[in-house]
C-alpha cells in the first residue's frame, strides 16, 4: 500500500515522552493504552519516537514488544535519551522555566516539559512533519485523520494544537483581564473567546520551524520576558503556557485543531472556584477522536 503524507514521506512520525516510570508506575499503563489504541486504529505506517531514560526505556521495550505481538501490527521504534535532549535544548529551557514552571526542579525534570518547543532541532532532518502526544491519551479514531489537519494549516502555521478545555488561562490572565475588561483572552471558545491551548497533542511543521527566523526570535529571553510581562503571565504548565502566549501574540503561527482531537477530562478547576463557568470551557461538541486523561483522570472505556 502507498501512503500519501502531506510531505510525500512514507512514515507518520509520532513522538511521545516516557520517563521516570519507576517513580510514576501508573504511567506504564497509560502508555500501554495510548500505544495500543494508536496501533489498533491506525491505517498508516508509524515511526514511533520515544523520549526516555534508561530505566523507562527497558519498560517501554517490553511493553511495545507485547503490544506489537498482541495486535499483530508493526511500527518502527526509535529511542532518544532525555538527558541528551535536555542538554541540546538547555537554551530554550532556561528561558522558559522561570515563567512557566511551578517549581524549579532538576535541569531535566524541567526540560521534560519544554522539549516540544525545540523538537525541530531534535528530530532527524528527514522528518518534515510530526505529532507529539502525552502518554495519558487514548485514540478513538485513525491518526491518519489527525495528520489531515496539516492540509488546512495556514501558510504561516508552525504548530497545530487544540484548545485548552478548562478556565486555567482565565485564572492565569486575571490581572490582564481586570485591566482589559473587553479582552477575549481567557474567554471560552464556545463564546468566541481564546481559552489558550493544551499541549497533550501537538502537530509540528518541522520544515517550517527549522527555517523560521520569526520562531527563533520569539523563543529568545528578551521576547519571552516581554511577552510574560505584557500579559502579567505566570504559568505552571510548561510548553502549553508558551503556546498559549504565542497564540495571543502571533496567532498565525498556530493552527487550531478541532477540540475532539484532544478531549481533556480534567475537572480540577471546576472545584476551585470556577463551577459557574467551567461548562463553557469544557464544552466540545465534535466527536471525540482522542481522549486526554489529564490530571490523572480515568479515561472512559469506549
Ligand atoms: N511524563 C512522563 N513521566 C512523568 C510525567 C510526565 O513521561 O513522570 C510525560 C508523559 O508523556 C505525560 C506528559 O509528560 O503524558 C505530560 O504529563 P501529564 O500527562 O501527566 O500532564 P497533564 O496532562 O496531566 O497536565
Ligand atoms: Mn497529559
Image (cartoon, rainbow, N blue to C red):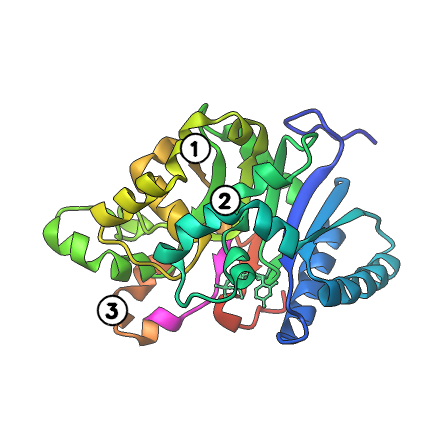
Badge 2 density bin: few <14, some 14–19, many ≥20, Cα 10 Å: many
Instruction: Tell whether 171 sits left or right of 162.
Output: left
On screen, residue 236 above or below 253: below
Residue under label 1: 215
User: What is the spatial separation of the Cα atoms under label 2 and label 3, in whole angstroms?
Assistant: 34 Å
Give residue 9's quadrant in the image. Answer: top right
2 or 3: mark nearer the eye: 2
Choose the circle earlier in sequence order: 2 or 3.
2
Secondary structure of residue under mark 3: helix
On screen, residue 179 above or below 253: below
Q: Residue at x 54, y 50 (%)?
A: 115
Closer to us: 139 or 205: 205
Secondary structure of residue under mark 1: helix
Residue 272 in the image: x percent, y percent?
30, 75
Residue under label 2: 117
Asked whether the viewer can see residue 47, the reply is yes
Q: Residue at x 53, y 42 (%)?
A: 118
Q: Quadrant of the C terminus?
A: bottom right
| Image mark for residue 276 | 3
Closer to us: 145 or 112: 112
| 106 is within the stretch colored magenta | no
Asked whether the viewer can see residue 142, the reply is no
Residue 264 in the image: x percent, y percent?
48, 60
* Magenta span: 262-269
| Image mark for residue 186 | none
Dots 1 and 2: beta carbons under 8 Å?
Answer: no
Dots 2 and 3: beta carbons under 8 Å?
Answer: no
3 or 1: mark nearer the eye: 1
Residue 217 in the image: x percent, y percent?
39, 32
Instruction: Tell whether 126 sits left or right of 197.
Output: right
Secondary structure of residue under mark 2: helix
Amino acid at each position: 500500500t502507498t501512503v500519501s503524507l502531506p510531505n510525500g514521506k512514507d512514515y507518520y512520525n509520532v513522538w511521545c515522552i516516557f520517563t521516570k516510570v519507576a517513580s510514576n508506575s501508573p504511567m506504564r499503563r497509560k502508555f500501554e493504552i495510548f500505544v495500543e489504541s494508536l496501533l489498533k486504529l491506525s491505517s498508516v505506517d508509524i515511526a514511533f519516537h520515544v523520549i526516555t531514560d534508561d530505566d523507562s526505556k527497558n519498560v517501554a521495550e517490553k511493553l511495545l514488544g507485547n503490544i506489537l505481538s498482541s495486535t499483530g501490527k508493526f511500527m518502527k521504534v526509535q529511542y532518544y535519551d532525555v538527558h541528551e535532549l535536555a542538554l541540546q535544548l538547555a537554551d530554550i529551557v532556561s528561558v522558559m522555566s522561570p515563567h512557566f514552571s511551578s517549581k524549579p526542579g532538576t535541569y531535566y525534570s524541567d526540560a521534560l516539559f519544554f522539549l516540544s518547543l525545540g523538537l525541530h532541532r531534535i528530530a532527524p532532518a528527514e522528518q518534515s512533519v510530526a505529532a507529539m502526544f502525552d502518554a495519558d491519551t487514548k485514540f478513538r479514531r485513525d491518526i491518519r485523520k489527525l495528520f489531515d489537519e496539516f492540509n488546512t494549516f495556514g501558510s504561516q502555521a508552525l504548530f497545530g494544537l487544540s484548545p485548552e478545555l478548562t478556565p486555567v488561562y482565565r485564572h492565569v490572565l486575571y490581572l490582564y483581564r481586570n485591566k482589559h475588561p473587553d479582552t477575549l483572552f481567557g474567554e471560552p471558545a464556545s463564546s468566541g473567546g481564546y481559552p489558550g491551548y493544551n499541549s497533550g497533542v501537538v502537530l509540528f511543521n518541522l520544515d517550517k520551524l527549522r527555517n523560521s527566523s520569526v520562531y527563533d526570535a520569539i523563543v529568545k529571553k528578551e521576547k519571552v520576558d516581554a511577552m510574560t510581562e505584557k500579559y502579567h503571565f505566570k504559568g505552571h504548565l510548561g510548553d502549553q503556557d508558551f503556546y498559549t502566549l504565542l497564540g495571543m501574540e502571533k496567532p498565525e503561527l498556530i493552527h487550531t485543531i478541532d477540540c475532539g482531537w484532544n478531549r481533556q477530562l480534567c475537572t480540577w478547576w471546576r472545584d476551585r472556584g470556577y463551577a459557574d463557568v467551567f461548562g463553557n470551557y469544557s464544552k466540545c461538541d465534535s466527536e471525540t477522536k482522542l481522549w486526554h486523561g489529564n490530571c490523572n483522570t480515568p479515561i472512559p472505556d469506549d
